[in-house]
Amino acid sequence: MSEKARKLFDALDLNQDGTLTLFEVVAAMRTKGPTLAARGDLPFWGVGDADASAALFDAADQNGDKVLTYEEFATVVDRRFGW
């Protein structure tokens, strides 16, 4: 799992509890996405609307518990973003 995945996960973890909810992913991508992309922590094409953020969340939520661990998240973003 990449360092970039860790930085992105930490940036999206708004309440800093070590997990991500759908609300956190959508809210953080909306508010922080362009800044994260400008810093190189997220590909520019990875900044999408709420539907794209929800699709990323759903793809990562492998056990269907509506909460993402770092491991679930990193597996998907490392592959999807080519990290």
Image (spheres, rainbow, N blue to C red):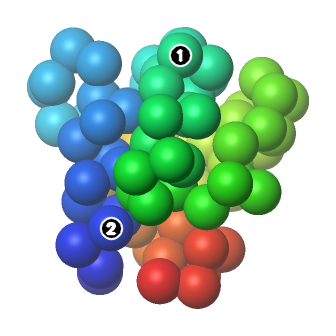
- The residue that disc 1 covers is 31
The residue depicted at 15 percent of the width and 24 percent of the height is: 16
Mark 1 surroundings within 10 Å by alpha-carbon count, few (fewer than 14), some (14 through 19), many (20 or more):
few
Determine the image quadrant of residue 1: bottom left
Number of numbered callouts drawn: 2
Left or right side of 61 for 8 = left
Q: Amino acid at mark 1?
A: Thr
Label of residue 4 in the image: 2
Above or below for 65 versus 45: above
Q: CA distance from mark 2 to mark 1?
A: 19 Å
Front one among 24 and 31: 31
Q: Extreme left residue here? A: 17
Whether residue 22 appears in this view of the structure is no
Front one among 44 and 25: 44
Above or below for 9 versus 27: below
Mark 2 surroundings within 10 Å by alpha-carbon count, few (fewer than 14), some (14 through 19), many (20 or more):
some
Above or below for 51 versus 24: below
Q: Extreme front residue here? A: 38
Whether residue 15 appears in this view of the structure is yes
| Residue 5 in the image, given as x and y percentages of width and height | 35, 64
